[in-house]
């Protein structure tokens, strides 16, 4: 059965959904997006996603398409219409449709589209075995704190990972790991979790935000600093976080086994802490 998607205020079957060929998201990548997990039919970390959406829109000067309450209602309507129990919702806001011109158009309303996707988030089989990661050069622009739809750099990195039989690529700049193509990056050494601090060089992940809070509550030490691929090769554990993988153990980086090639105790504990909170709704 065809999914029901949202396009500028209307709910339509996916094969009937249309957006203008002049939409600036299509032409310039001039837009912002968010992905919200759904577990048990409920939205996960939704308030954090709305906070980040608002910040990204301000940074690129795109008008808000609707209030947080209206966007929440839209998400829940998509959950209900599609019978979504577990998976995620992709939402995209662009500057709108106008004849092609680099400068901002005047009097144009932003475009808002959203759709659902089903997937196993809680019982993701990758969490039991761990995943492989490769490192790639970070070729992106310098405002990675903005969750823009301009994703060609991450797409190329993800494709390199796929072609090497890996789940994810960690991007490296000036000899240091920045983040994954669609995730935040962490290593563990002597029980301490190490991850890059927030700046314009990485995205402030909503799952990252929740996880660091949970780690503090459970007395897990977090050290926010840069680390190298070589340091990662010698780590006791490694893992990544994202809205659709939650906490995902890493067992190999660039062909080098991490932690004996098995998901480590810290990553497994942090995943459990996060899933326990998700289960509470």
Image (cartoon, grey):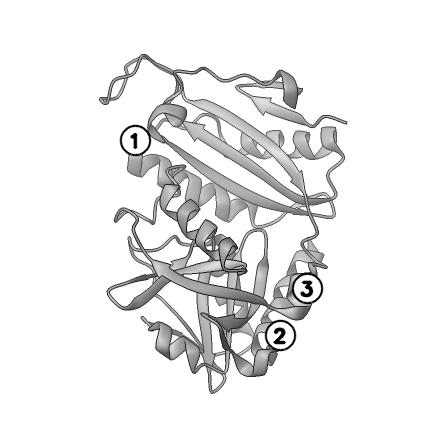
Q: Does dot 2 land on a helix, a strand or a loop? A: helix
> Looking at the image, which residue is at 40% across and 25% down?
26
The residue labelled by disc 2 is 269
Give whichever of 5, 66 is nearer the camera.
Answer: 5
Q: Does dot 3 land on a helix, a strand or a loop? A: helix
Label 1 – label 3 distance at C-alpha? 37 Å
Place of residue 231 in the rendered image (x, y in percent of width and height, measured from the top left): 37, 79
Task: Judge left or right: residue 182 versus residue 248.
Answer: left
> Looking at the image, which residue is at 64% across and 23% down?
14
Around disc 3, counting alpha carbons within 10 Å, would you say few (fewer than 14), some (14 to 19), or many (20 or more)?
Answer: few
Give whichever of 212, 143 is nearer the camera.
Answer: 143
Q: Earlier in the sequence, mark 2 or mark 1?
A: 1
Q: Could you say which quadrant of the image residue 249 lies in?
A: bottom right
Give whichever of 180, 204 is nearer the camera.
Answer: 180
> Looking at the image, which residue is at 49% across and 25% down?
112
Around disc 2, counting alpha carbons within 10 Å, would you say few (fewer than 14), some (14 to 19), or many (20 or more)?
Answer: some
The residue labelled by disc 1 is 61
Place of residue 171 in the rendered image (x, y in percent of width and height, measured from the top left): 37, 59
Q: Earlier in the sequence, mark 3 or mark 2?
A: 2
The residue labelled by disc 3 is 276
**Image quadrant in which the N terminus is located:** top right
The relative height of residue 232 versus residue 108 in the rendered view (above or below) is below
């Amino acid at each position: 059965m065809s999914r029901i998607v949202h396009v500028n205020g209307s709910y339509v079957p996916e094969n009937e959904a249309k957006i203008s060929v002049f939409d600036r998201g299509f032409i310039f990548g001039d837009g912002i997006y968010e992905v919200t997990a759904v577990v048990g039919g409920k939205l996960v970390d939704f308030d954090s996603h709305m906070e980040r959406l608002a910040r990204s829109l301000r940074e690129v000067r795109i008008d808000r398409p609707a209030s947080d309450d209206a966007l929440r209602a839209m998400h829940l309507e998509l959950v209900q219409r599609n019978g979504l129990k577990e998976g995620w919702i992709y939402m995209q806001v662009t500057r709108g449709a106008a004849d092609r011109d680099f400068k901002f158009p005047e009097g144009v309303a932003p475009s808002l589209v959203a759709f659902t996707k089903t997937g196993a988030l809680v019982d993701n089989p990758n969490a039991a075995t761990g995943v492989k990661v490769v490192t790639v050069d970070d070729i992106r622009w310098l405002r990675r704190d903005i969750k823009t739809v301009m994703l060609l750099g991450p797409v190329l990195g993800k494709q390199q990972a796929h072609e090497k039989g890996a789940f994810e690529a960690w991007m490296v700049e000036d000899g240091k790991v920045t983040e994954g193509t669609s995730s935040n990056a962490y290593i563990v050494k002597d029980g301490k979790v190490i991850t890059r601090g927030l700046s314009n060089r990485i995205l402030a992940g909503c799952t990252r935000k929740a996880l660091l809070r949970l780690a503090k509550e459970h007395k897990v030490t977090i050290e926010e600093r840069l680390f190298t691929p070589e340091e990662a090769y010698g780590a006791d554990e490694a893992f990544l976080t994202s809205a659709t993988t939650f906490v995902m153990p890493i067992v190999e980086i660039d062909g080098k086994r991490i932690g004996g090639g098995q998901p480590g105790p810290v990553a497994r504990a942090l995943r459990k802490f996060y899933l326990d909170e998700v289960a509470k709704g």
